[in-house]
Image (tube, coloured by chain):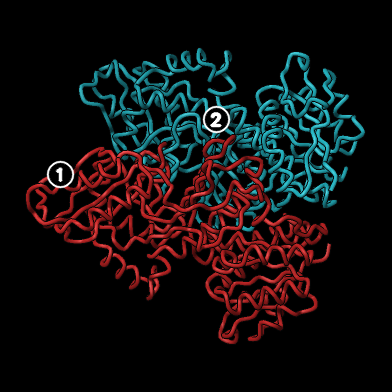
Chain colours: A cyan, B red
Amino acid sequence: MKPVQIGIIGLGNVGLGALEILAENARDIALKLGFPLEVRAVSSRGVAEKTLPAAFASALKTANWRDVAEHPDIEIVAELVGGTGVAREIVDTAIARGKSVVTANKELMAQAGAELWDRAIAARINLAMEASVAGGLPIHAVLREGISGDRIKTLYGILNGTCNYILTEIESRGASFGEVLAEAQKEGYAEADPSADVDGFDARSKLAILSALAFGERIVPADIYTEGIRRITPVDFEYAHQLHHTIRLICAARQTPEGLIVSVRPSLIPQSTILASVRGAYNAVWVRGKFGADTFYYGKGAGSHPTGVAVVSDLMRVAREIRSGSPERVSPFAHARLGEYKPIPVTVHRSAYYLRFRVEDRPGIIAQLASALAAESISIDAVLQLPNANWRDLPFVITVEPATESSVRAAMARMAELNFLIEPSLAMPMELPL
Amino acid sequence: MKPVQIGIIGLGNVGLGALEILAENARDIALKLGFPLEVRAVSSRGVAEKTLPAAFASALKTANWRDVAEHPDIEIVAELVGGTGVAREIVDTAIARGKSVVTANKELMAQAGAELWDRAIAARINLAMEASVAGGLPIHAVLREGISGDRIKTLYGILNGTCNYILTEIESRGASFGEVLAEAQKEGYAEADPSADVDGFDARSKLAILSALAFGERIVPADIYTEGIRRITPVDFEYAHQLHHTIRLICAARQTPEGLIVSVRPSLIPQSTILASVRGAYNAVWVRGKFGADTFYYGKGAGSHPTGVAVVSDLMRVAREIRSGSPERVSPFAHARLGEYKPIPVTVHRSAYYLRFRVEDRPGIIAQLASALAAESISIDAVLQLPNANWRDLPFVITVEPATESSVRAAMARMAELNFLIEPSLAMPMELPL
């Protein structure tokens, strides 16, 4: 069978990683597919300076992405540019020209995925986005096919490798958030502007995409309550360990009778859960299905080669679909339309909570905090204070029995009016009753 | 689009589980596919006594599987009978009639998978076998699509839930193999004849299938060196923990420059690896790819509903392929044909080993054992003896630095000739240098 011709737009880490894999695994890929993939053209602004694998010496190299997206011979365009500007134009152009698209673009798919899928279906092309979430971890294949027969009840993810690296460094070394972040920036693990990672926005885009795949609903980043990890301190890990928990930035989507509760926030999770064993720059997804019970998936969150594998695997699958004459028929962003998966505010979420306070040292503080909780009908589970802690220097912690987020927020608002708080208190849900 | 009509043969746990899911998720399935699945016929010898979901009241119920496998309207036959007798006839008949097949049958696919795939391709039908390995864990989707672009170097699996349950009970309670097995049999977790599980044969079939998917080679159970868990004692876990390891029945397939080394055997694995966190009746697969680094997959190994999810997910995928007119084109058992994946004897495998001895109490024993190791150029790493151990009652352990399996076996043979061994010594590789 003749080769399927592909064009790669964007020669950053992911694009170059995918090209290396396409070159080195070319024979395996052809054997697995029954036909080869041919890299017909590559494009990036700096294409002149890029060193490409020798196998692609005869490919068209161009600084103008339109030469690729509009190339008459190219059947699949890989959009590896990122962002929502030019990338959107590239995807639109490719679809308009009847070309299939493989993308690694989480922002674009999170914001405009539903619309792009509708257009792909109308244009009778294929669209693939495995690389857009948790590059090294084939969670799309799992949700799209592997467990598609199940009805997913809950999905928990650790979807930002930078945050997980920072948190596990704070945990293992007792270093502060600021120290670890500065080191990570120096080593190139974190961006100069770390906000997308540490404030949870990157994870939020990924959760939007996974929620669509898992629940078949049009979930966009704005639907997702998001909190970053800037306020997590070594002492929070000490308290968490006392409670046999650890802290991770947990992306959660839970189906409840009222609807879907989606959030990205630092959370306490039991040390006994397999999710707690995810350390460093890894990603993981834990899924509870109505029928399939619990499954768990783990891999590198990013990186040139891991994400390159996702891109190449998508290219192979789309090439197979093209040769089968099998375009997309159903959008993963809208298959359910049952109403039961509508996102609802996180304020109705019910969970045990970890509340951390830093206060002035004076009598009666616990009594006043307890009154604020009692006023919202929240029961205290435990009051924890580290040995040798000075109340001025080290915070103390109250854990409370399951309560709604709204009642916890109301109690926190009452507490904020008490005049002995040295800094705003911190509330983290204690998740995952496994 | 009109429904795809399916027939279910075999109404044991898995068949009934699949039917429940098909009934309860019917609307979701139709939304995900764009068309419904219709259960047209079901068959089992005891069909008269089975209670089926009300949704399938109008399905044909028959005690004769041929009524299903030869039914003119049925497009997909689910073979959920198991074994290699009637099941083989069912699959052969369905393929001969041009029907696609979904199977949960590990023995059949391990023994005859390559041949059945060739016949499926010739007949232009679809064949799916997700449920044949690690029912609740979509490892087929992962290998077939999710990471198909990678080149897999090593695959480690915990593929028998009964063995993992028994081992983790020995570990946590200090109970003997015999005690835990008897309990497991009483509770229905283990078969009356436990050999298929505890002697590693069940895991071996699963590894044969996964090795084919991962490496594209015709690997059959006879290629796989297999050892069961009957000899593992609580004291082995005590020694393993001293070494910061634990013990699991590890299914391993490793690509080496000489070829593929495949084995199923109790092995020491570091407690720090995520594979060590797999406890109870769970299954897991850990994959190291050349490009994708490490990924890890975890879920229920068996059970009516988890395996049912795999069957239903396969039915959905095959139904989609049928509606796309996209039959199988490439066999997963023979895509590579590169020669570099040929199974080679486990004797060339190189690893650190844990050697356990029970001996008579007399002077000079360590010297003689050390001489036997030295004669095979094997270096001792450590000699361990539990506190208060009496050499007659409790075994002691020697760990050795990496050596080939053949040299370890030769040293063990030398030791067997020494007349102070009370029982045959036990050797376990110390795997997974993570």
Residue type at tag 2: Asn
Indicate the position of residue B362 as horizontal and vertical percent values: 7, 52
Position of the C terminus of chain B by quadrant: top left
10 Å crowding of disc 2: few (<14), some (14-19), many (20+): many
The quadrant holding residue A195 is top right
Q: How many tags in the picture?
A: 2
Q: Residue furthest right?
A: A72
Image mark for residue B367: 1
Give the answer, above or below, for where B379 lies relative to A64: below
The one of B47 and A262 positioned closer to us in this rendering? B47
Q: Nearer the viewer, residue A405 or B35?
A: B35
Residue placed at 92% from the left, 33% from the top? A72
Task: Check the image and name the residue furthest to the front.
Answer: B375
Q: Chain of mark 1?
A: B
Identify the residue at image location x=82%, y=39%. Answer: A100
| Residue A152 picture location, percent across and down | 58, 52
Q: Specify whether A67 is left or right of B160.
A: right
Q: Note whether B259 is above or below A356 in the view shown.
A: below
Q: Secondary structure at mark 2?
A: loop
Q: Looking at this view, is B431 or A297 the one in front?
A: B431
Q: Which numbered dot is residue A160?
A: 2
> Residue A421 appears at what percent x and percent y?
36, 18
Q: Residues within 10 Å of mark 1 (few under 14, many from 20)?
A: few
State the residue in front, B392 or A199: B392
Q: CA distance from mark 2 to mark 1?
A: 54 Å
| In this rendering, position of residue B43 left or right of residue B358 | right
Secondary structure state at the residue bearing disc 1: helix
Q: Which image quadrant: the N terminus of chain B?
A: bottom right
